[in-house]
Image (spheres, rainbow, N blue to C red):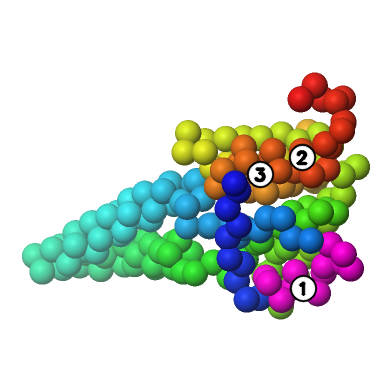
Amino acid sequence: MLRTAELSPELAAVLEQERERGEQLLWAAQSQPETAPGRSGGIAFAIVMFCVGLCFVIAGVVMVRSGDGSGYMLGSAGVPALIFFGWMLSRIFSPNSTQTGYVITTKRVLIITLNGAQREVRSFVPRDANLLRRVERLDGAGDLILGDVATTTPGYAQNIGLMNVADVRGVERLVRETFFAGDTRDGR
């Protein structure tokens, strides 16, 4: 049985506004940005910037104490690196203001994104979500891609779907059973 997660109160309120008459909730989850891949690279880069900045500041202090006036320039070169380090840490560890919720109902798949005062709701009915693609990690979590959207970069399309959800295989199974129960076109 696929487990349904709690949505934040803000996402739940939007879901209630968006739900159509007779539409039943089958599954819901919220993306977990703190577990999203790619954060460790930002942390490593921030730590390197901190070390570089700290080395410049320490070298500048040592040079000034030894009577070398050029230490002021060297030490001040480390200040931007330390400021950048602080900015990186605030971006990495601050609570993500963007909330994304994923909902599967008896009629459609919803992707609800809240970003400050802005709200985006993407709705996929069965005819829109008939070419599913699953990207699964070893822990069973992953992405269920519902479609691609062209971007301004030639030859590049952005994946649209349920990103970083637990038990992505179970979510795919639920979508197929709900929307394509009698359809054998894809061979499953």
Secondary structure of the residue carrying tag 3 is helix
First along the sequence among labels 2 and 3: 3
Name, please, the residue furthest toward the left.
Answer: 66
Q: In this view, does 187 lie above or below 67?
A: above
Q: In which quarter of the image is residue 70?
A: bottom left
Q: Quadrant of residue 131?
A: top right
Label 3 and label 1: CA atoms lie apart by: 21 Å
Label 1: how many residues lie within 10 Å, few (<14), some (14-19) or many (20+)? few
Asked whether 98 falls inside the magenta stretch, the response is no
For the record, the magenta segment spans: 11-23
Label 2: how many residues lie within 10 Å, few (<14), some (14-19) or many (20+)? few
Res 84 seen here: no
Label 2 and label 3: CA atoms lie apart by: 10 Å
Question: Residue type at mark 1?
Answer: Glu
Secondary structure of the residue carrying tag 1 is helix
Q: Dot 3 corresponds to which residue?
A: 171
Q: Dot 1 corresponds to which residue?
A: 16
Magenta span dominant secondary structure: helix
The x, y position of residue 142, in whole percent, is 58, 41
The x, y position of residue 181, in whole percent, is 82, 36
Question: Residue type at mark 2?
Answer: Glu
